[in-house]
């Protein structure tokens, strides 16, 4: 892709995100979401492969539907209350429609079917943008309207998302699809705590984005797209494989790594809110996710590939690990001791 074109698209992404997260008026928020959608489409379809074109088409249709619903819910609210302010979403029907629209934009169950397909058709770096940067504006809209949303509906969507994200990721061999179901599962954790402690949702998102960025950049550096290639990647970059093992375990939420921190705080807060059954269910369902993270980690570092493998062992290169991967991985592994400081900040 032409560097100037790429610069325009990346700048548009930043502009769309900034407009949405800094707006008070629903129409401005909607405009930012639309700019984001139009800016990411060329990045998804840049390879001109039929699968990439299909992914871009699916993404456009889903996001256009969700944006229409966002506009419809805000217009309904303005009709009844005379308010276009995002924080004044008080009409129950409007808040239900908005929850459905944002769930569609994020890929929460039951509006999740587009996300694995779109991620599978995108390059790894575009997949990283779809999993992190593109989810930030919808999450900020949920954060701003958190007082008006229906707790029962959000809790149900959250538990279903963690269940489906873990369950559907079990049988996958494509790394991008596994990361898509991982994203759906993490969104469930963010959604369940949104009404009770919105800042914790944002903290969870920031830590998730950091760990996912570390995984995607490592996979991109190793040129890995499926498990069979991952099994032979250890010969090419042993240090990166070891880093990937720790980052994946952190993403799974195992102590004493960073990924345990948001889960621990969310379970603690749910228990305080007399939602111990929900906390137990969501913790047990996250074990499904743990299985496929362990499977990825096992393929990356512990297995020797069978002699009948179709993939040749790759030459080991002395190329140094990228500084961005090193910094992100360090943060993805070692932030748990800072939890007292983080809890006082939020």
Image: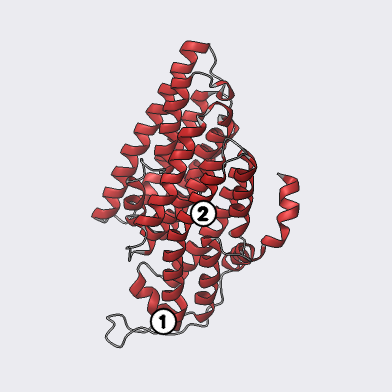
> Which one is nearer the viewer's eye here, 62 or 158?
158
In the picture, the quarter occupied by the C terminus is top right
Using a 10 Å C-alpha cutoff, classify the residue at mark 1 as few (fewer than 14 neighbours), some (14 to 19) or many (20 or more): few
Task: Find disc 2 in the rendering and name its residue.
Answer: 283
In this rendering, would 14 be left or right of 45? right
Residue 258 coordinates in the image, percent (x, y): 62, 61
Q: Is residue 67 left or right of residue 327?
A: left
Sequence order check, earlier mark of 1 and 2:
2
Total numbered badges shown on the rendered structure: 2
Dividing the picture into quarters, in which one does residue 253 lie? bottom right
Q: Quadrant of residue 148?
A: top right
Element at label 2:
helix
Q: Nearer the viewer, residue 83 or 184?
A: 184
Q: Where is residue 104? Give x, y as percent.
A: 39, 38
Residue at position x 56%, y 48% in the image: 205
Q: What's the residue at 61%, 52% (across, down)?
A: 262
Give coordinates of residue 130: x percent, y percent: 44, 49
Q: Dividing the image into 4 quarters, which one contains the N terminus?
A: bottom left
User: On the image, numbered disc 1 is attached to which residue?
Assistant: 303
Q: Is residue 42 above or below residue 318?
A: above
Residue 247 seen in the figure: yes
């Amino acid at each position: 892709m032409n560097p100037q074109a790429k610069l325009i698209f990346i700048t548009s992404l930043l502009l769309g995100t900034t407009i949405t997260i800094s707006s008070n008026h629903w129409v401005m928020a909607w405009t930012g979401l639309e700019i984001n959608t139009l800016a990411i489409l060329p990045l998804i379809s840049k390879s001109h492969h039929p699968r990439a074109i299909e992914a871009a088409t699916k993404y456009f249709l889903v996001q256009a539907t969700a944006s229409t619903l966002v506009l419809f819910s805000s217009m309904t609210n303005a009709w009844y209350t005379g308010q276009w302010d995002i924080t004044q979403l008080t009409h129950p029907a409007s808040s239900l429609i908005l929850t459905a629209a944002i769930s569609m934009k994020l890929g929460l169950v039951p509006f999740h079917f587009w996300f694995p397909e779109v991620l599978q058709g995108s390059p790894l770096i575009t997949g990283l943008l779809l999993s992190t940067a593109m989810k930030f504006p919808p999450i900020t809209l949920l954060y701003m309207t958190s007082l008006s949303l229906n707790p029962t509906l959000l809790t149900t969507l959250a538990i279903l998302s963690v269940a489906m994200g873990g369950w559907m990721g079990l049988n996958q061999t494509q790394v991008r699809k596994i990361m898509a179901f991982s994203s759906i599962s993490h969104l469930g954790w963010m959604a369940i705590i949104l009404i009770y402690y919105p800042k914790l949702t944002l903290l969870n998102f920031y830590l998730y984005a950091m760990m996912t960025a570390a995984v995607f950049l490592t996979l991109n550096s190793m040129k890995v797209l499926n498990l069979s290639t991952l099994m032979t990647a250890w010969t090419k970059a042993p240090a990166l494989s070891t880093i990937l093992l720790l980052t994946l375990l952190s993403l799974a939420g195992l102590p004493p790594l960073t990924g345990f921190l948001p889960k621990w705080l969310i379970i603690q807060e749910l228990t305080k809110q007399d939602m111990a059954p929900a906390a137990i269910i969501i913790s047990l369902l996250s074990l499904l996710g743990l299985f496929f993270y362990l499977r990825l980690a096992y393929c990356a570092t512990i297995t020797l590939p069978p002699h009948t493998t179709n993939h040749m062992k790759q030459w080991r290169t002395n190329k140094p690990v990228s500084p961005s991967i090193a910094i992100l991985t360090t943060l993805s592994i070692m932030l748990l001791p800072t939890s007292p400081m983080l809890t006082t900040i939020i």
